[in-house]
Amino acid sequence: MSLKTTTPRPAQRQARAVRLGPRSLTALALVSAVGVAGFGWPFLAPPTSRLSAHAQDAPWLFAGLLVLLVAVVAAAISESGLGPKAVAMLGVLAATGAALRPIGAGTAGIEPMFFLMVLSGRVLGPGFGFVLGSVTMFASALLTGGVGPWLPFQMLAMGWFAMGAGLLPGPDRLRGRAERAMLAGYGFLAAFAYGTVMNMAGWPFMSALASNVAFDPHAPVATNLARFVAYCVATSLGWDLGRAVVTVVLTLALGPAVLRALRRATRRAAFETPVTFEAPRQ
């Protein structure tokens, strides 16, 4: 009686729609640094600074700056290898995400777009994820009429959201329940993080005289931090919890089918194989 032994097949390296190069990584790091300053300037600027003295103007300044910087990052990533097949995939996923977002409009936390961003970033990588998140939020704003000074912050935050999924460990080997549990856990935490950073973008617009949870440019950092926590609990905790729960449920329920479809499409697209055109035979 002979025993047949089989050697496990090595994990196949996962193809990426976009391979980030030094230029795109530098641009992404710079825009992220400016984005952190744009979101967190109430805690970074001392009460005596000129920026705190213009608390109502600062969000507009950062919003205008972020529009330009997000465009620069998208261009830099595109130059690093966003080919025609990746552009087609980007268009399909962005249109799907933009169509999913209005489903939960006006209903606390029902935002199915987030689970698609998590799964797409996981399969297609961090570079593609950042562009997809930004483009999807922009397309959704045009579709729903949600264009305003908050849009650049939403684009950057959603870009971070999808990019983070592409940076999770085990993109080539981790599969099955363990991967879905990791993606569900990431989606749960990132949904809260998204809501928190978006609160930071709108919170300084409130007048300090309107509420005891509003930003006070003359108060110390500790006081404003306590006000901000109270503001989040009072205004968005229920919405963020709903978003997190919906993301987890959809990731666990639809994750296997969506992940298989995305990976199958990625293999067939062969993003890393250049497109060539042959002259017709005479």
Image (cartoon, helix red, strand yellow):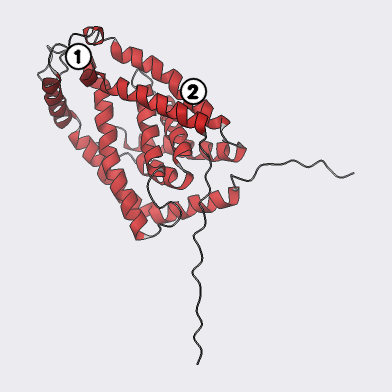
Taking the image as drawn, is residue 16 in sight? Answer: yes
Q: Earlier in the sequence, mark 2 or mark 1?
A: 1
| Residue carrying label 2 | 72
- Quadrant location of residue 238? top left
Q: Nearer the viewer, residue 234 or 35?
A: 35
**Is residue 50 depicted above or below 162 in this figure?**
above
Q: Position of residue 55 (x, y in %)?
A: 23, 11
Looking at the image, which residue is at 55% across and 31% down? 78
| Residue carrying label 1 | 46
Q: Secondary structure at mark 2?
A: helix
Looking at the image, which residue is at 48% across and 38% down? 128
**Is residue 133 depicted above or below 36 in this figure?**
below
Looking at the image, which residue is at 24% across and 41% down? 242
Q: Nearer the viewer, residue 98 or 194?
A: 194
Circle 1 Cα neighbour tier, 10 Å, few/some/many (<14 / 14–19 / ≥20): some
Q: Please name the amino acid that badge 1 sits on.
A: Pro
Residue placed furthest toward the front? 22
Q: Secondary structure at mark 1?
A: loop
Q: Position of residue 168 (x, y in %)?
A: 37, 46
